[in-house]
Structure formats: C-alpha cells, structure tokens
Amino acid sequence: MSTYSRRGFALGALATTGLAACGNGIGSRGGDRIDSRVDTTLNFMYERFPGTRDLAEKASGILVMPLVTEAGFGLGGSYGRGALRIGDSTVDYYAIAGGSAGLQIGAQQYSHVLFFMTDEALMEFRTSPGWALGADAEYAVRSEGGNLRAETTTQLAPVIAVIFAQAGLRVGATLEGTKYTRIIP
C-alpha cells in the first residue's frame, strides 16, 4: 500500500515538467527558425554594409546573432541565439548571455556578427566550453553607422565584431562581458 503526499505529487510533477522542458531538440524546428533569421540578418548586413561581404568571403567562419535583447535597471542582462557558419553551411548553434551592474536603465535590441579571420581563432571558439569575446577583437562599425570598409588593418584582427540594427533606449551596444555557449535548438 502506498501513500501519496502533496510533496511527492509536487516533486513528481516538477520532475515530469523538467524532463519535458529538457528536450534535445530532435525533430524540433528551432534550428530552421534560427537559420531563417540568420539568412535575413546577413542579407540586411550585406545590403547596408557592402564591405562585410568581403569580410565574410575571407573569414574562416562567422557567428551570426540575429537578435540580442539587452535590458537593465541597475542590474542588466542580455540574451540571444544564433548560428555559426563555415562557408554557406550552419555547423553549430550558439546562445549569447551577459550580465552587467552599474548605473544603467533601459533596453535595446541589436544584431551582431563575429567574423573569425583566422583558423586559430575559429578553432579556439569552437573548442571552448564557453567563450568570451577578448581584447583581441576589433569593432568594425562606428556608432554613426558609416560605411564599413574591409581595410587591411581590420583584416589582421583575429576576430572582427560588427554590431548593427540597434533599436531601443540604451546608448551603444557592447559585447564585453558576454559568453557564447553552444546549444541544441
């Protein structure tokens, strides 16, 4: 004879819900949705900043984050999902997450693309369990949104970050303090 308690029932329901939420993505359309957004983002970037097409052709790989949402009120955070492409093929999916503290208020959304200009930089990114953008990155788009040119000095940087399509109430976007983690959509 077994007895049921509210605690046992609650734990069982929580475990069942947790297992359902931890699906591995097999058969889901999450990857298709991310790939579609990546295609749209790349098309917009190539049209708005034609020099990025040259960067993409010379890069060992590119990580496209179609939409990153950042918000803060004293404490802040950011999150987005995207895809790593080598050539024209998606090889992995990634999430970006970041946190910040300080004098801040507001929210914004933006897109960004990381161009891995060397095989070593791409390999370091892909083999890291959680990768943070380091000091060796070059930011290639000015805040006033001028034309981006694929200059020789810019192409020597191992990682080039392009931030664009900003909308919201916060001033500027930064990728410092963010972490990229491989996901299964």
Image (cartoon, rainbow, N blue to C red):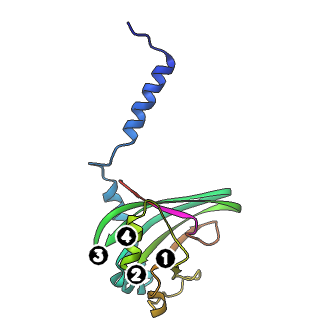
Q: Can residue 44 be seen in this view?
A: no
Q: In the image as oriented, which residue stretches furthest toward the top?
A: 1
The residue that label 1 is drawn on is 161
Q: In the image as oriented, which residue stretches furthest toward the bottom?
A: 152
Q: Can residue 127 be seen in this view?
A: yes
Alpha-carbon distance for marks 3 and 1? 18 Å
Q: Earlier in the sequence, mark 3 or mark 1?
A: 3
Residue span colored magenta: 176-180
Contact (Cβ within 8 Å) of mark 3 with mark 1: no
Query: Is 50 included in the stretch rendered in magenta?
Result: no
Residue 6 is situated, as x and y percent measured from the top left of the image, at: 50, 18
Residue in the image at 57% along x and 69% along y: 176
Disc 4 versus disc 1: nearer the observer: 1
The residue that label 3 is drawn on is 87
Residue in the image at 38% along x and 66% along y: 126
Q: Residue 40 carries which label?
A: 4
Left or right: residue 49 versus residue 29 is right
Alpha-carbon distance for marks 4 and 3? 16 Å
Left or right: residue 104 versus residue 62 is right
Helix or strand or loop: what does disc 3 sit on? loop
Three-letter residue code for mark 2: Met
Residue in the image at 44% along x and 83% along y: 49
